[in-house]
Amino acid sequence: MFARLPPDPPHECQIVSTSAYSVRLAWAPAFSSSDVKVTYNIRYRQKYEEFEEGEDKNSKIRELKGIQNFAVEIMSLQSCSLYEFRITAVSKYGESKPVILVQYTEPQLSPQHILATKLSPNSIELSWEPPYKRANDLKNYVVYWTDNSEARLSEWQKMNVYGRRVVFTELKYD
């Protein structure tokens, strides 16, 4: 009689791509007997997240179970944050040891809290807050606009703005 063991961990685990709010992981299949079905689990969390006094540290761990592919994109992450990912192989005989990957999400580069304020029937002020975090010093913003919703972006007008607000006057009134 042979003892059945959990599958080996997946191998060649890697971060394939990263954005401000997502990370895509990929791996090669775990070595296991060909007659045993293997799926994959991923547990992930922010690496250095702060906890309230008395809060369970495991309460912030997210988990994806029963993944049958060899890649997954994890969405709804926070920008500019360090995440730890633990990938395991699972069969009816148990769960493998984890492969651990650590990755920063990208900085969020879009302006935040964009607000259009009507100043008169044919003018508005557009204002915004800077991106949450910036990779480099921000010198200016580029604002695109058009009065033709069918126009391609290359046909839109654009303006460099060196502050956090711009006023549009003489707008057409529908």
Image: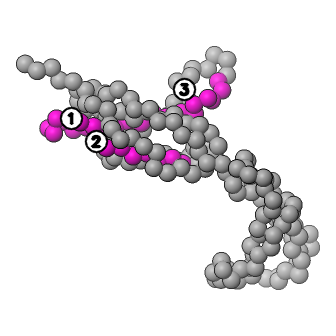
**Residue 138: quarter of image:** bottom right
Label 3 or label 2, whichever lies nearer to me, is 2
- The x, y position of residue 3, in whole percent, is 15, 20
- The x, y position of residue 17, in whole percent, is 49, 51
Amino acid type, callout 2:
Pro
Instruction: Name the residue tied to disc 2.
Output: 29
Residue at the (31%, 27%) spot, across then down = 95
Residue at the (66%, 80%) spot, across then down = 154
Q: Is residue 3 left or right of residue 31?
A: left
- The x, y position of residue 161, in whole percent, is 84, 66
Give whichever of 14, 116 is nearer the camera: 14
Using the numbered discs, state the Cα–Cα distance from disc 3 to disc 2 in whole angstroms: 29 Å
Amino acid type, callout 3:
Ser
**Residue 25: quarter of image:** top left
Disc marking residue 59: 3
- Crowding at dot 1, Cα within 10 Å, few <14 / some 14-19 / many 20+, comes out as some
Residue at the (66%, 48%) spot, across then down = 107
Q: Is residue 127 left or right of residue 134?
A: right
Label 3 or label 1, whichever lies nearer to me, is 1
Find the magenta span and give its range: 22-51
SS for dot 1: loop
Q: Earlier in the sequence, mark 3 or mark 2?
A: 2
Using the numbered discs, state the Cα–Cα distance from disc 2 to disc 1 in whole angstroms: 9 Å
Q: Is residue 145 left or right of residue 105?
A: right
